[in-house]
Amino acid sequence: MTPPPEETPPRRRSELTFRGNQHAGRHGWLRLTPAYGARLAADLLADAAPGARVLDPFAGSATTLLSAAERGHDATGVELNPFLVGFGNLKLGRFQARTLSAAAERAEESLRALDAATPVEAPPMFRIERWWAPPVLEWLCRLRGALDLRGRTGALLEVAFLRTMMALSGASFGHVSMSFRDAPPELPASAGARFRADVKAVLAGARTQVPGRGRVHRGDARTLAPLEGRYDRVLTSPPYPNRISYVRELRPYMYWSGHLKEARQAGELDWEAIGGTWGVATSRLKEWAPTRTVPADLAPTLDAIADAAPADKRANGPLLANYVARYFEDMAAHFRALRPHVRPGGRLDYVVGNASFYGVLVPAEELLAARMEAAGFEGAEARVLRKRNSKRELYEYVVSARG
């Protein structure tokens, strides 16, 4: 379903990605590179009936859920990553004025007490010097030690701290996957002002009340065990079959918030996730075998990937074929688990990108549409949403179906 060469391809439309969220209140609290935009979620929910039950089974940073709740809908999410579960529920929360005032006061108290504060230990991140130079890291550890992060007031301050932490890091968001630039060698004189600005931004978003209801449950999209009842709309963006690791993108947030203590935990979490290949997940892929017969529509793509690796990377071909096979087996399980939770006539909208390995195109939009229909959904179809990057063949799609 990629447009043929003679057609004018869609624009990249960065406003539909996280770049469009940066000044959108709670949607812009933390920058997560793979996240899609609130504008896209709003567009796809524009025709939802008032008070619709909306489900996001890959809740991520809760963009869909917050967009739905902002329009008065009843939003439910399922998410495997514990950091994102807590962050999503905070974004969906309702905050009293006294909570926000207390957060502002605590922030100022922390800055005044900074010199006397006992710093926390630096997170045990691999090659941490790529992230922060020693003076910056020491200041962040001291600020984190000065902050009182108890309760909902503290949860808001933690988001502000994470914003500041990332702003002072060597992380770069110029690509789909987070990369690195040179970390600032010295602590900027404006570091304290930066934290004040981040507190102000977080509290400004929290002041806007969300009329609808929303809740994120921790769970596995392959089973959807926490879910009860049926939903009118399913709007989500699952992981793409392109080896982008969401855990990798979240590492600094998860280490500083205490959700990661060592690198192996990140690999274990990625192995549990659909499409994860970080750390130990990659080595386990070598031994993984399908639990079902490989579907006929997928087998040629897997064979092509296995044979396409260059001579100096010959072992990578079968590994990547296994990765793609596991991804679509997991997504098929997801659609089977989802089917009982969608009302008759309820609509699915899945935002997903295709992928390419060694020049072999993985038509994710076609393969996911087929798995929707195999699970009992009707009328599955895909439409091109936008161009993803400079590679000619890579697009983003909305794959839709009915219950």
Image (cartoon, rainbow, N blue to C red):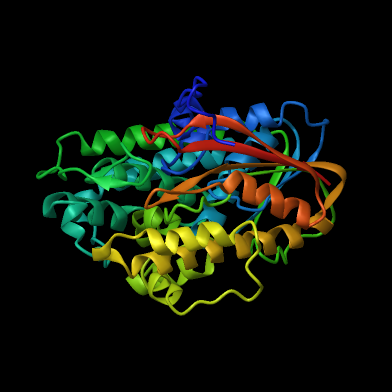
Q: Is 142 situated left or right of 308 in this image?
A: left
Q: How many marks?
A: 0
Q: Is 258 situated left or right of 92 in this image?
A: left
Q: Is residue 268 among the parts visible in the rendering?
A: yes
The image quadrant that residue 67 belongs to is top right
Instruction: Name the quadrant of the N terminus.
Output: top right
Q: Is 293 situated left or right of 73 in this image?
A: left
Q: Give the vertical position of 88 relative to 259 (above or below).
A: above
The image quadrant that residue 207 belongs to is top right
The image quadrant that residue 380 belongs to is top right
Q: Position of residue 97 (x, y in %)?
A: 57, 35
Foreground: 124 or 38? 38
Foreground: 217 or 372? 372
Farthest-out residue, left: 185
Q: Give the vertical position of 149 relative to 262 (above or below).
A: above
Residue at x 39%, y 43% (from the top left corner): 160
